[in-house]
Every structure is written in structure tokens, then in C-alpha cells.
Amino acid sequence: MKLSDYFWGSLSIIRLNHPGVSNQVLKRMVRSGQFPKRYSGIQITQALRLQLKDTIGASFSFGGSALSGTVNSLAIGIYEELSK
């Protein structure tokens, strides 16, 4: 079974919770039952809400720090993982 055959929402949730897991390890863990093959709609909604809350909280935190003068500049790094 290809990794793309799994439901995309389930893969997204697993990737958010375990960002360093490779595709091969992810397949093995799903097959062994460590990760579910599919999440219910309620679980996906709850994960989305949690991510939105975290994002909004981080935005308010950064905004408050920027307004108070604690943060003067912002540097954003974009990294690409190269496969061997």
C-alpha cells in the first residue's frame, strides 16, 4: 500500500505530532498499529482547532512583544531537508 493511499487528514495529524518521521517509518508504524490508519472527523476538527489556537496565541504573543519594543526585528529561516 502506498503512503498516498492513506487518508490525507490522518497523515497531516501524524506529521504535526511527529514531524521527523520518514515515510518508510510512518508506513511501518501505521501497519503495526502505533498510528491509526484513519482519524474520525471529530478528531481532525479537534486537531485543527488546537493548531488554530496555538497559531493565534503565538501571534498575540509576538504582537505584544513587538508593540512593547522587546522584539525589534524578525528573521525567518526556511530550511530544506535533502534526502540522501
Image (tube, rainbow, N blue to C red):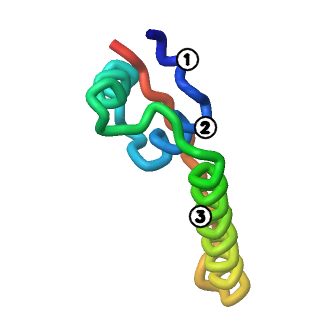
The residue shown at (42%, 37%) is 36
Three-letter residue code for mark 2: Gly
Which element type, helix, strand or loop, lies under badge 2?
helix
* Above-or-below relation of 7 to 10: above
Give left or right: position of 33 versus 15: left
Please report the residue visible at 63 percent of the width from the left and 82 percent of the height from the top: 65
| x, y percent for residue 5 | 55, 16
Residue at position x 39%, y 44% from top? 18
Would you name the residue on which mark 2 appears?
Answer: 9
Foreground pick, 40 / 25: 40
Distance CA(mark 1)–CA(mark 2): 11 Å
What is the crowding at mark 1: few (fewer than 14 residues within 10 Å), some, or many (at least 20)? Answer: few
Q: CA distance from mark 3 to mark 2?
A: 14 Å
Question: Tag 1: residue type?
Answer: Ser
Place of residue 42 in the rendered image (x, y in percent of width and height, measured from the top left): 63, 54
Label 1 vs 3, first from the N-terminus: 1
Closer to the camera in the image, 52 or 6:
6
**Mark 3 residue type:** Leu
The span from disc 1 to disc 3 (Cα, nearest Å) is: 25 Å
Image position, residue 45 (x, y; %): 66, 55
- Under circle 1, the secondary element is helix
Q: Does 28 sit above or below residue 49?
A: above
Residue 84's place in the image compared with 48, above or below, is above
Quarter residue 34 falls in? top left
Residue reaching furthest to the bottom: 68
Viewport quadrant of the C terminus: top left
User: Tags 3 and 2 in contact by the CB under 8 Å rule?
Assistant: no
Q: Which residue is mark 1?
A: 4
Name the residue beneath numbered marker 3. 50
